[in-house]
Image (spheres, grey):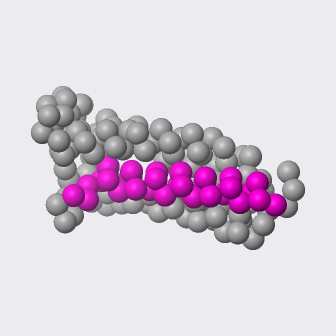
Amino acid sequence: MGKLTKKAENLLMLIWAQSFIALAGSLFYSEVMGYVPCELCWYQRILMYPLVIIYGMAAIKKEISIALPGLILSGIGMVVSTYHYLVQKLPALQEAGGSCGLVPCNFQYVNYFGFITIPFLAGTAFIIIFVLHLMLLKESRRK
């Protein structure tokens, strides 16, 4: 593939930064704050952590095609995070999250402003990554 535009390079770095911040945030909550991740949190981590490597390598090599798995992982991550958030917030689904594992998936370690929970933060990161990747694809087709 040809040389990336400056905008495409910036988008790749922005996506990498977002995935790194999400990784650091999840490690902060588990390692510093001592919050034990539930089963759905682990699935979200499994989907988020490789994004740091995928987008980092794509940015270093300046090759968008390397990052395609990141679009797929972030899309799946959006679905898992949305489901997890709904398990926490919807009374109809809270029973389903009660028997999730050692830590119930409906348990909320944090609840900033009454709606921002850890799955909400992860979901926001996945959405940002997904949208920025779509913008990256659009930018790469433009040249």
Q: Position of residue 104 (x, y in %)?
A: 19, 37
Residue 120 lies left or right of residue 5; in this view the side is left
For this orientation, the residue located farthest to the front is 142
Q: Is residue 117 magenta?
A: yes
The rendered magenta stretch, by its main secondary structure, is classed as: helix
Q: Residue at x 20, y 53 (%)?
A: 109
Q: Position of residue 125 (x, y in %)?
A: 44, 56
> Compared with residue 67, is residue 28 higher up or lower down, i.e. above or below?
below
For the residue pair 119 and 30, the one nearer the viewer reads as 119
Q: Position of residue 67 (x, y in %)?
A: 67, 48
Residue 70 visible in the displayed image? yes
Residue 60 lies left or right of residue 40; in this view the side is right
Q: Position of residue 47 (x, y in %)?
A: 48, 41
Q: Residue at x 32, y 53 (%)?
A: 120
Residue 103 lies left or right of residue 75; in this view the side is left
For the residue pair 101 and 67, the one nearer the viewer reads as 67
Residue 27 visible in the displayed image? no
> Compared with residue 13, is residue 39 higher up or lower down, i.e. above or below?
above
Where, quadrant-wise, is the C terminus in this rendering?
A: bottom right
Q: Is residue 19 magenta?
A: no
**Which contiguous range is marked in magenta?**
115-143
Q: Residue at x 51, y 61 (%)?
A: 18
